[in-house]
Amino acid sequence: MCAIAFASIAGASRAAQVVVDGSRLGQTWEGWGATDMFSLSGLQVEPEASSPGDISSDARKAILKLYYHDLGMTRVRFWPMGYEPADAKGQPRAPAPGPKRFVWEGRGTRPVTSVNPFCDDHLTMGREFRSPGELFIFYPSAHQWESWMAVKPDSPTWHWGADARFNPAMVDRYAEHAVAAVLHIKQAYHYELPYWSLFNEPTNTAKPSKETTLALVLACGRKFKENDLKTTFSICDDVTPEASAQTIEYVLANEEARGYVGAVSYHRYCGDFVLETVKPLLERVSKGEPLVESPVSFYASAIKYGKSVWVSEQCSYGADGITHFDAGRARANHVCDEINNGKVNAFDFMLCYFVERGKPGNEETPIFLRFKDHRFVKAELNPIGWWLSHFTRYIRPGAVQLGVSVDDSVVKAVVFRHGANKTVTVVVINNHAQSSAVSVRIDGLSTLGGKAQRVRTSPQNLNEQLPDLAVAQGSLIDTLPATSIVTYTIDQGR
């Protein structure tokens, strides 16, 4: 099958050739998500926000509709804290499990938000905005575990951060702590957590050795099994892929422990990729350099043992002259490379929603919450959200990646086939500073439909719905504005 020439398109001397190999199958997609740090009840920690409860039930529903329906998110990683607090002597409230030991309803500022607020938002209120037939993943990651689990928590100079360190003697207590939360959520919300992440960025917080991590996986895994729970672990949610690479390999080498592990996970901060700043990232993109060249070092072990591979957190840090549009394009390019070259099964961003500050800060969230005079006004997708929605709305859980090649290094593409509705989703990014012609050809799939639905984001328009484009013998032609992204949805037939 021959690609169609582009001589007829004004200003285009040659089309970038995007060739899809329908017979070359990649990973199965498990979804898109973000981290909920404080739930909608904890926003008073932000200077623009007010006390808990000022975001009404209707407003919360509108925010969750943006997250689940408009963005199409299907995952949430949340940070439960303070549900087993210490007494005045720094010890857990009771030596044995009991109803007074745990505080599930804890609300308020970030450090004391407990479990129920997150569940109320996502398991109860968010349910109506999700497709009941799609995979939904809601799971915790301990950012600040209970203070009595740390080494010398009663030291007068002790504080979270550089001094925080998990006490290996608390392995069994951690297991009791974890199983209590899983059982509570299952009983109160009729949802069994599919995963549990031991710590968020452990090299920055808990600092466990690989031996302690293995002991935690074994102790918690056995507790889950004793209670007929199917919850598995995501390890290790660390600040870079290599920060916990040895620990992941060490745990997977243990036959019993790897039976309790469902996914290996990492963040992309610092390290060799320097993806936390936008300008260097866009400079590399403009040169045609891949942001991710290959899977992480523990990918082979993950695949060998049938474990999913997740990017479980990512954000951009703003700088002078950087806009949310820039940040969106930078992250969209990273997403392409993480899927094509990193071969991940899921991608989570830093935050579900954030108070709007007027310029990119140390967060990456697709939803702005706007306040005026310390009262909530509205929520809306920002330009980052519109860029990311080209992936999150159209690449759904269960889709299978298809092989793709592009002969222009400044143009990127990612392709998935949805078996359930027999459609092919093609996302193409034009990183050129000028309008560029693109030819997309799909080989190896029969009865490819006659039209492609299109949506485009460019400097001129966000989420622009375009007229359908003709598909002839598996090929389509288009012109992409400078620094733009377009998503094509092509019906493969029934």
Image (cartoon, rainbow, N blue to C red):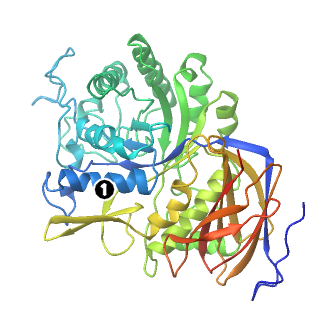
Give the residue number, with chain letter if any, for mark 1.
63
Asked whether, in this view, residue 375 is left or right of residue 14, the answer is left
Crowd rating for badge 1 (residues with CA inside 10 Å; few <14, some 14–19, many 20+): many
Residue 471 locus on image (x, y percent): 75, 64
Residue 149 locus on image (x, y percent): 29, 29
| Nearest to the observer: residue 314 or residue 484 | 484
| Quarter of the picture holding the N terminus | bottom right
Q: Which kind of residue does numbered mark 1 sit on?
A: Ile
Q: Is residue 140 above or below residue 56?
A: above
Q: Is residue 410 above or below residue 91?
A: below
Quarter holding residue 472:
bottom right
Q: Is residue 220 above or below residue 9?
A: above
Residue drawn at (50%, 78%), measured in percent from left and top?
461
Residue drawn at (64%, 74%), measured in percent from left and top?
431
Q: Looking at this view, name the residue that lies furthest to the bottom.
A: 11
Quarter holding residue 480:
bottom right
Q: Is residue 275 visible?
A: no
Q: Element at badge 1?
A: helix
